[in-house]
Amino acid sequence: MNFDDKLSILLVEDNELNQRLMKISLQRYNYDVAIAENGLEGVQMFKSHKFDLILMDIMMPVMDGFEATAEIRNIESIELSRGYTPIVAFTANMINNSREKCIEGGMDDILEKPFDVFKFREILNTLPQINS
């Protein structure tokens, strides 16, 4: 992947400070960032826009990250022309949200808070949908 490519990223995160910090960090690398404040809003934004990647918080009000991911994967299975959108879990609680649990829940990988742009870019390198 060429990191100069402009990716469209949906950040689904309820914490305003995390939203601001991540948006600034991601925009430094030329990524377009849209923000949803909870899983339900994230699903609604997914329905109306095409994103290259979704960064999904796990613990959120209204609809958590696992519920939102399941809904997104359901939409993709019905609307095949949408294609597949990689979803990376973003969590501060690695003990209760293991990589295996996230993969089983339909996510592609997991990124621990606080946001580490270098780890994020390593994950991007492993996603075939981003690198094709």
Image: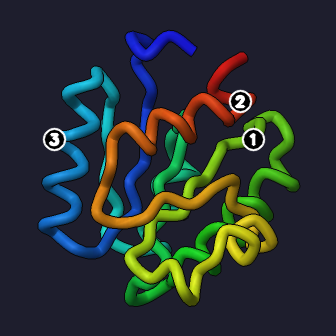
Q: Where in the figure is residue 103, as x and y percent of width and height?
A: 75, 65
Going 13% across and 66% down the picture, which residue do you hit?
17
CA distance for labels 2 and 1: 8 Å
Q: Secondary structure at mark 3?
A: helix
**Number of marks in the rendered image:** 3
Q: Secondary structure at mark 1?
A: loop
Q: Position of residue 114 (x, y in %)?
A: 28, 63
Q: Quadrant of residue 68?
A: bottom right
Q: Position of residue 76 (x, y in %)?
A: 78, 51
- Residue 13 lies left or right of residue 99; in this view the side is left
Q: Which mark is residue 24?
A: 3
**84 versus 114 height, above or below:** above
> Dot 3: few (<14), some (14–19), or many (≥20) neighbours within 10 Å?
few
Above/below status of 47 relative to 95: above
Cα distance in 3D space between marks 2 and 3: 24 Å
From the viewer's perspective, is residue 21 above or below residue 16? above
| Three-letter code for the amino acid on which mark 3 is drawn | Ile
Residue nearer the viewer, 43 or 95: 95
Mark 1 or 3, nearer chain start:
3
Label of residue 84 in the image: 1
Q: Residue at x 46, y 34 (%)?
A: 121
Mark sitting earlier along the chain (2/3): 3
Q: Amino acid at mark 1?
A: Tyr
Q: Quadrant of the C terminus?
A: top right
- At label 2, the amino acid type is Gln
Please tell me whether mark 2 sits on a helix, a strand or a loop.
Answer: helix
Contact between labelled residues 3 and 2, with CB atoms less than 8 Å apart:
no
Q: Nearer the viewer, residue 1 or 83?
A: 1
Identified at 80% across, 72% down, the residue is: 104
Which residue carries the number 2 mark?
129
Q: Name which of mark 2 and mark 1 comes first in the sequence.
A: 1
Find out whether the residues at labels 2 and 1 contact each other: C-beta distance under 8 Å: yes
